[in-house]
Amino acid sequence: MSGYDEALLKRARALHDAPNVTMDGHNDLPWALHDAYDHRLARFDLREPQGHIKIPKLRHQYLHTDFPRCRKGGLTAQFWSVYVPTTIRGGEAVQKTLEQIDCVHRLCEKYPDELEFAYTAADVRRIVKDGKLASMAGLEGGHQINGSLATLRMYYRLGCRYLTLTHNGGPGWADAALDENSKWNEHATAGGLSAFGVEVVKEMNRLGMAVDLSHVHPDTMRKAIHVSEAPVLFSHSNTRAVCNHPRNVPDDVLRSLSEKDGVVMINVNAPFVAGGFFVS
């Protein structure tokens, strides 16, 4: 591996060793399976490498996940995103979300030697110790609760353990970094969080569901960190000081995040690391 410090690489790899848990905070596989196979799980086998199988229906043409690659990367715990785009709203968004959650549970049933659904931190540690990939579900957009705290509570009962407050476009009660056309939202029209948005955060705290601030406007980051009584997370974001993408995290937010024991889980997607937003 030319160009790498072997000693540093060895130390990095040791972080993956048991009893440590190597967790990925965001994987879009369920929606990729929706688009590629209509959630028909018999049509593919994640035990086999998928990187060479071209799928024209997918924007990236190929699945990015299979068990050989998970093992090679040392992955031991995965948050599967049960994403629904903001172009789908209302009751249809709730139905699509349930179908996404169902997909995650059925993946665990199809591959019982590889995956097991985790509801608690103790579950994660046990599953990792058993040599399987601990699997959890994360909601990716406040519009998926359709303005209902009862829907939020039912998602929790089904195993969802974080909610990203907004996807592009947002739910109205929290401001997104980008609009539905992926253009930067300069102004936070809801003031970061509306009164109902504050209720959502407080109910998530009560349930034990993590508040995820990837995709949200900086004012939403600041308001949510202030309101939340529990540590918050960014499931797939980076630092604005290095890469000035609108979805990355400003320094003042990073400082306040550290004061509340929050965490940023790094996004390795190229536009959030370098490219046109990179700060030279």
Image (spheres, rainbow, N blue to C red):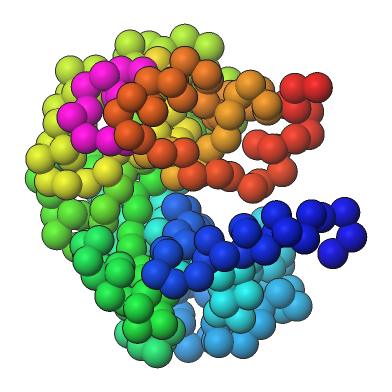
The image shows residue 128, relative to residue 198, as above or below, that is: below
Quarter of the image where the C terminus is located: top right
Residue drawn at x 41%, y 39% as measured from the top left = 263
Q: Is residue 92 visible?
A: no
Q: Is residue 111 left or right of residue 199?
A: right
Q: Position of residue 14 (x, y in %)?
A: 57, 65
Q: Is residue 126 visible?
A: yes
Q: Position of residue 57 (x, y in %)?
A: 65, 65
Residue drawn at x 41%, y 82% as measured from the top left = 131
Q: Is residue 227 magenta?
A: yes
Q: Is residue 90 left or right of residue 1?
A: left
Q: Position of residue 111 (x, y in %)?
A: 41, 86
Question: Which quadrant holds residue 77?
Answer: bottom left
Q: Is residue 229 magenta?
A: yes
Compare residues 212 and 18 and report the one nearer the observer.
18
Quarter of the image where the N terminus is located: bottom right
Q: Is residue 193 left or right of residue 67?
A: left
Residue drawn at x 55%, y 44% as measured from the top left = 266
State which region is magenta.
Answer: 222-232
Question: Which quadrant holds residue 73?
Answer: bottom right
Residue projecting furthest to the right: 2
Q: How many marks?
A: 0
The image shows residue 200, relative to residue 24, as above or below, that is: above
Q: Position of residue 7 (x, y in %)?
A: 73, 59
Residue drawn at x 34%, y 50% as measured from the top left = 139
